[in-house]
């Protein structure tokens, strides 16, 4: 699955080098179709060099390991993380705060087109392919009992949403929460907030069927997008945490205005380029003492958090099954990306 400037993504034969030191080759079994891949296509590569190999929400089986690999072995079921804190090479990791690491461990680029050109895998994953070579730290072991089409969601979408509420801006037990936008990521915020013990979770969306799903996944209240700030304030008096999982800046403005005194508004997901936030510094931020936070992928530590979430799913504390609403083949992946313009389900997963 490959994207070149101005050309529609298409499937073609690729070859892989052998995994190098600290790298593992994973036979991809499932890969979720995440909006960020569409973003890569629509922003002309998102700053990455062409040609590009799409896919970054994968899970599969380790099939080969390079030198010095100790944490996984062939046959292990792994989720492929695109975040892997460096551990000791950046100031955040050195002070013991790997969730703020900006220096992720990466494997070398190992995939080639038939003509030999080196491909750039999205977020160094490239999971819209039968096999992917990633850094050992990005191959995170999870229990095999978790169905692989659910496990792959831990790689990006689900962890981004749940992690926003669990780790990026950790929701206190008993707190009140608002979630703007109830697509896959927003619904995962709802699940994360519930797991964190939030007492009140208000879901906001324009689609009634999404609000219904949000209720089934843990939202205590649901409001339509129109006049949602007033509705949320009336229901809760202002929330402790507001999350926006929509790209439009209005989502973050609303999140700020939904917050109670001392609340936090968190931006989840990648916004479209060139958009500007217009808030009143005095009335929206200073007087109500509202903070704005940004999360990248839920600020996860994949080696700890993916097994934690996998266990939570197996124990019935989160419901990954409801997030997989369509399964397609690799040949249908390009169409599935296009469907993200007007999604009808929660998540489409490519099954190999
Ligand atoms: Zn993603
Ligand atoms: Zn680091």
Image: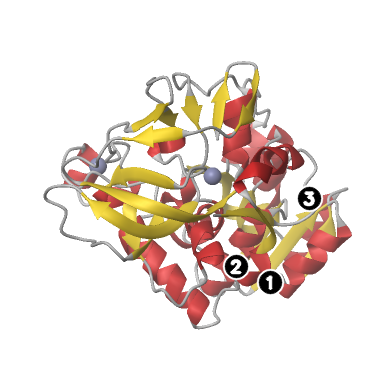
Provide residue 275's location: percent of width, then percent of height. Answer: 66, 24
Mark 1 lies on a secondary structure that is: loop
Mark before the other along the chain sequence, 1 or 3: 1
**Closer to the observer: label 2 or label 3?**
2
Q: Residue 217 carries which label?
A: 1
Provide residue 160's location: percent of width, then percent of height. Answer: 52, 52
Viewer can see residue 111: yes
Residue 56, placed above or below residue 323: above
Viewer can see residue 270: no
The quarter of the rendered structure image containing the C terminus is bottom right
Q: Residue at x 57, y 45 (%)?
A: 268
Provide residue 287's location: percent of width, then percent of height. Answer: 61, 42
Residue position marked by numbered label 2 in the rendering: 191
Residue 91, placed above or below residue 137: above
Q: Residue at x 88, y 48 (%)?
A: 226
Q: Residue at x 20, y 61 (%)?
A: 71
Residue position marked by numbered label 3 in the rendering: 229
């Amino acid at each position: 699955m490959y994207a070149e400037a101005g050309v529609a993504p298409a499937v073609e034969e690729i070859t892989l080098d052998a995994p190098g030191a600290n790298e593992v080759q994973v036979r991809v079994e499932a890969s979720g179709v995440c909006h960020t891949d569409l973003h890569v296509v629509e922003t002309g590569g998102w700053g990455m060099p062409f040609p590009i190999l799409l896919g970054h929400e994968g899970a599969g089986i380790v099939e080969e390991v390079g030198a010095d690999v100790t944490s996984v072995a062939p046959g292990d079921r792994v989720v492929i993380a695109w975040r892997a804190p460096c551990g000791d090479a950046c100031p955040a990791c050195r002070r013991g705060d790997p969730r703020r690491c900006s220096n992720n461990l990466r494997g070398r680029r190992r995939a080639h087109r038939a003509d030999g050109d080196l491909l750039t895998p999205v977020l160094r994953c490239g999971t819209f392919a039968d096999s992917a070579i990633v850094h050992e730290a990005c191959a995170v072991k999870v229990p095999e009992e978790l169905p692989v089409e659910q496990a792959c969601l831990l790689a990006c979408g689900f962890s981004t949403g749940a992690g926003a509420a669990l780790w990026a801006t950790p929701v206190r037990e008993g707190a009140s929460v608002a979630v703007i936008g109830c697509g896959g990521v927003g619904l995962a915020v709802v699940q994360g907030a519930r797991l964190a013990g939030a007492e009140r979770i208000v879901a906001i969306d324009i689609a009634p069927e999404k609000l219904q799903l949000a209720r089934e996944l843990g939202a205590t209240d649901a409001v339509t997008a129109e006049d949602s700030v007033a509705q949320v304030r009336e229901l809760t008096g202002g929330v402790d945490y507001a999350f926006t999982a929509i790209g439009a800046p209005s989502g973050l403005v609303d999140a700020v205005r939904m917050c109670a005194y001392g609340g936090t508004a968190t931006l989840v997901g990648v916004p479209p380029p060139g958009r500007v936030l217009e808030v009143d510094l005095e009335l929206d931020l200073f007087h109500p003492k509202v903070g704005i936070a940004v999360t990248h992928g839920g600020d996860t530590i994949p080696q700890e958090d993916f097994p934690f979430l996998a266990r939570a799913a197996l124990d019935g504390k989160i419901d990954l099954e409801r997030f997989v609403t369509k399964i397609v083949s690799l040949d249908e992946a390009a169409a599935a990306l296009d469907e993200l313009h007007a999604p009808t389900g929660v998540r489409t997963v490519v099954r190999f």
